[in-house]
Amino acid sequence: MFVLVNLKAYDVDPVEIATAARDVAEESGARIGVAPQAAHLPAVADTGVETWAQHVSAVEHGSHTGSTLAEAVADAGASGTLINHSEKRLKLADIDAAMDAAERAGLETCVCANNPDQVGAVAALGPDAVAVEPPELIGGDVSVASADPDIVEDAVAAANAVDDAVAVYCGAGVSTGEDVDAAGDLGAEGVLLASGVAKADDPRAVLEDLVSPL
Amino acid sequence: MFVLVNLKAYDVDPVEIATAARDVAEESGARIGVAPQAAHLPAVADTGVETWAQHVSAVEHGSHTGSTLAEAVADAGASGTLINHSEKRLKLADIDAAMDAAERAGLETCVCANNPDQVGAVAALGPDAVAVEPPELIGGDVSVASADPDIVEDAVAAANAVDDAVAVYCGAGVSTGEDVDAAGDLGAEGVLLASGVAKADDPRAVLEDLVSPL
Amino acid sequence: MFVLVNLKAYDVDPVEIATAARDVAEESGARIGVAPQAAHLPAVADTGVETWAQHVSAVEHGSHTGSTLAEAVADAGASGTLINHSEKRLKLADIDAAMDAAERAGLETCVCANNPDQVGAVAALGPDAVAVEPPELIGGDVSVASADPDIVEDAVAAANAVDDAVAVYCGAGVSTGEDVDAAGDLGAEGVLLASGVAKADDPRAVLEDLVSPL
Amino acid sequence: MFVLVNLKAYDVDPVEIATAARDVAEESGARIGVAPQAAHLPAVADTGVETWAQHVSAVEHGSHTGSTLAEAVADAGASGTLINHSEKRLKLADIDAAMDAAERAGLETCVCANNPDQVGAVAALGPDAVAVEPPELIGGDVSVASADPDIVEDAVAAANAVDDAVAVYCGAGVSTGEDVDAAGDLGAEGVLLASGVAKADDPRAVLEDLVSPL
């Protein structure tokens, strides 16, 4: 299982959370990644934690002021990137081009989708992983694996029907080791979470709990 | 084979072309549709031709000023709609929602895509048809079926691999009956075209040629 | 005072409301316009009511599938158009280009803005009118002229400081003749409203009340 | 005069150019800034050069995955930001909100516009500076101050008519000290440039030439 902590634009210290994540990953042997704002990538990567971008633009080197170039986030220490997060939805053609950009830059890709149909759609583009996150559960208290187990199983089935080399992650409401365990039982190979760690009083303790079943 | 004429925002008389399309369809027995600007839908539908919208918004009834509501284009006489045309690319989640909107309004759907990967992606969402139109060939003089036959065959294969109930159309540079014939030989069940008819000196003659092999 | 009724994407009969608006305008001598979905423009214009588009695209004739061409909405009977409604916000450069498009097509323009600063900004582009509609009051029960009279006066001041030939309209929560009266007292030369008429049990009665002070 | 070098998404070493810019600024006493990709901000700021962001999002702290938070770019060492560059055009309401975000984060703002009308519009929002960059001249060999001096003078007049505290910069095709001089003669207080420095064989020599008249 991969545990990916998305720091969004939260008012948190990215280095503090990254350091905790690095330590818990090292101690437990679990795979934990942290995805900060692009401007915070170098500081997060400097901690040694597995570092992900939250987004890359559908562009190559060139005249693209204000873009988030895949090569720039890779330079800054990212080894993977989210694409099409529900808070940064992209046009289909741009998901395709952003995946190409990530591949050129050597970034692992996880493309997000709202429901199993969309999971099938993005799986057809050949990412490393897809993530299903029902928008109505994001930021809530109940894990997707408890609130809507069918959506996870259906997402796994939809992805496998198209390309069984694509890993499926799930997200929304994940905050405990029990949630991670339940997600794994449904066929997910990773979880995305954000506020559960980023807004916790003790992010390290939450991370330790998250990876305890692994 | 379905021949769908997209009038885009061309400076043409939509009723004149619609009337020609209706007449040629009636005389030949071929299926021909015309897709005008939303504001021209009632006038085009009044001719009796099969009428399509160029786009519908990913919304339901409600506070959506400036949208193109599926129900409104159906009221105005459309029986089908393009979605995600390369000149009106949508976010993946909005393609999904626009298809839901079209279904609620009883509209047939044709979702456009740039390449076979994206054709596979949109086929996973379950439209009635998908259309592959390589952007670099749109508006050109050479038919996609001649310039890049592989892309049509690959699109048919990509769609069938996901859902063999989805018809595949192709477009870009189509302007003759020979082009339509070639597209059919590659597995396409329809063609999209625009300038080939809309900018012709004699649209009726072009339409007659287009349907001559059918 | 100009009373402009925006039908948004409401589930209403646009012709019924347009007919009521036409009758009340004729009986009272007041200026009343109706802005339907683009696909409903011809039917609304056929009633004889002053007909507005909800939006026009920042494009000219050409390859712009799915756009809302100013010339097409003018053909369909519109004599004016909203631009940059808060539910259809545009890029600044596209507001400018949409105004050019409207001018080419002979459409009167009303550019919407959220606050007095933005009213000043759009006034600098030279529209016929600007409309201030605080997003937090749209669709509510309290008229902008009662809930936030300063915003209307500040909008009038901001527009006049830039170009005193630009009329200022206001909107959000307007539903009675008293609201129209209050808006006029604050310097507004028109009101935008939507649900107050469109969702009323008796749209004609609401319209009669709206224009009663004029 | 302020000389702001936009590195866009060019395939260049941002630290090398930043170091040259820092040295030339120190030696000449001229004000030179460098605007890299967000992920490169910390490395560029570490050189000691005045560091600008290319863009900030119209958001506050919160659930905004993939945004470019003003606070994050400030953390990373930026002291100013471009907003609404012609390659990253924003909705009017988002220009307004991005300026608020920049102000909260203590960033100086320069809002870009295509023509004098749009310069007047953005000046009404109260930025520190506006920049006029005719899109058709961007990336070309002829400086805006030579190719279209009227546009610079008209931009200065348009900004002053709205708010004479707003500085006016100009850009497009600027690459020599003569261009900077000509811009200053037309009333500009700064220049934006990109390829003229970033793609030069010897960026330091170009920078030295640029500031030679100052």
Image: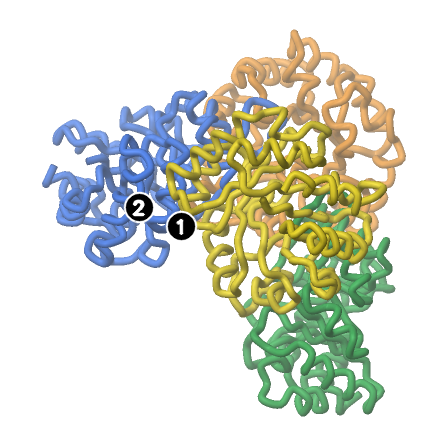
Chain colours: A yellow, B blue, C orange, D green
Q: Chain of mark 2?
A: B
- Decide if residue D66 is in sight here: no
Does residue C27 appear left or right of residue D76 in this picture? left
Task: Give the total number of marks visible in the rendering.
Answer: 2
The residues bearing labels 2 and 1 have C-alpha atoms spaced at a distance of 9 Å
Residue at screen point 70% across, 18% down: C196
Task: Decide if residue B46 is on the left or right side of residue D93.
Answer: left
Q: Quadrant of the C terminus of chain A?
A: top right
Q: Position of residue C136 (x, y in %)?
A: 78, 31
Residue A188's spot in the image, x, y percent? 54, 38
Disc 2 packing (10 Å; few <14; some 14–19; many ≥20): many
Q: Is residue D50 left or right of residue B69?
A: right
- D208 to the left or right of B177: right
Asked whether the viewer can see residue B2, the reply is yes
Picture quadrant where residue D118 is located: bottom right
**Chain ID, mark 1:** C
Asked whether disc 2 touches disc 1, contact meaning CB atoms under 8 Å apart, the reply is yes
**For the point 62% across and 58% down, which residue is it?**
D88
Secondary-structure class at tag 1: loop
Circle 1 crowding by C-alpha within 10 Å: few under 14, some 14–19, many from 20:
some
Residue holding disc 1 = C63
Q: Residue furthest left?
A: B213
Which picture quadrant has residue A19?
Answer: bottom right
**Viewer-closest of B168 and A23:** A23
* Up-down relation of residue A180 to residue A69 (above or below): above
Residue C172: x and y in percent read 75, 27
Specify the amino acid type for callout 1.
Ser
State the residue at coordinates (28%, 42%).
B192
Residue D102: assigned label: none
- Residue at numbered disc 2: B194
